[in-house]
Image (tube, rainbow, N blue to C red):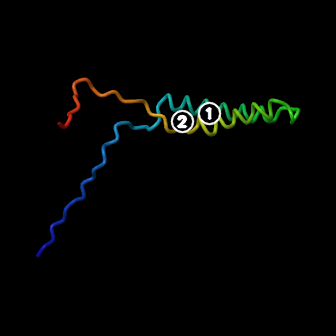
Amino acid sequence: MARIETKAVSKRKPILESLPFNKTNYRILGLGLLSIVLGYVALAQPPWDGTMPLVVAPILLVLGYCVLVPLGILYRRKTVPEPNQTPQHKS
């Protein structure tokens, strides 16, 4: 007997956007990069035991690396459902 070949059907949703990042993502990433650069500049300021290298620089670096860069990567704009579509509730 001959085998009948079936194609595997993909259950993935089609990607609507061509690029994963938008203008807001790039702005947040730019702010993160600026914060990191300013943190390293503040870290290089003399005297080495002053306020800039010991307080301001670590705050800017943590803000850039741990908050702004991940936020810029993970941020997505909330989608608003179209008004002509109504959600169906099960009773």
The quadrant the C terminus occupies is: top left
Taking the spot 22% from the left edge, 25% from the top edge, the residue there is 84
Q: Residue 45: which quarter of the image?
A: top right
Judge left or right: residue 48 versus residue 20.
right
Question: Circle 1 sits in a helix, a strand or a loop, which is it?
Answer: helix
Give the CA distance from mark 1 to mark 2: 9 Å
Judge left or right: residue 8 versus residue 43.
left
Taking the spot 46% from the left edge, 31% from the top edge, the residue there is 22
Crowd tier of the residue under label 2, counting other residues whose Cα lies within 10 Å: few below 14, some 14–19, many 20 or above: some
Crowd tier of the residue under label 1, counting other residues whose Cα lies within 10 Å: few below 14, some 14–19, many 20 or above: many
Above or below: residue 87 compared with residue 13: above
Where residue 71 is drawn, which disc sits there?
A: 2
Taking depth in this image into account, of 88 and 70 the one nearest to the observer is 88
Judge left or right: residue 64 versus residue 53.
left
Q: Position of residue 19 (x, y in %)?
A: 43, 37
Circles 1 and 2: CB atoms closer than 8 Å: yes
Where residue 32 is drawn, which disc sits there?
A: 1
Question: Circle 2 sits in a helix, a strand or a loop, which is it?
Answer: helix
The quadrant the N terminus occupies is: bottom left
Taking depth in this image into account, of 66 and 24 the one nearest to the observer is 66
Above or below: residue 56 compared with residue 5: above
Q: Earlier in the sequence, mark 1 or mark 2?
A: 1
Taking the spot 60% from the left edge, 31% from the top edge, the residue there is 30
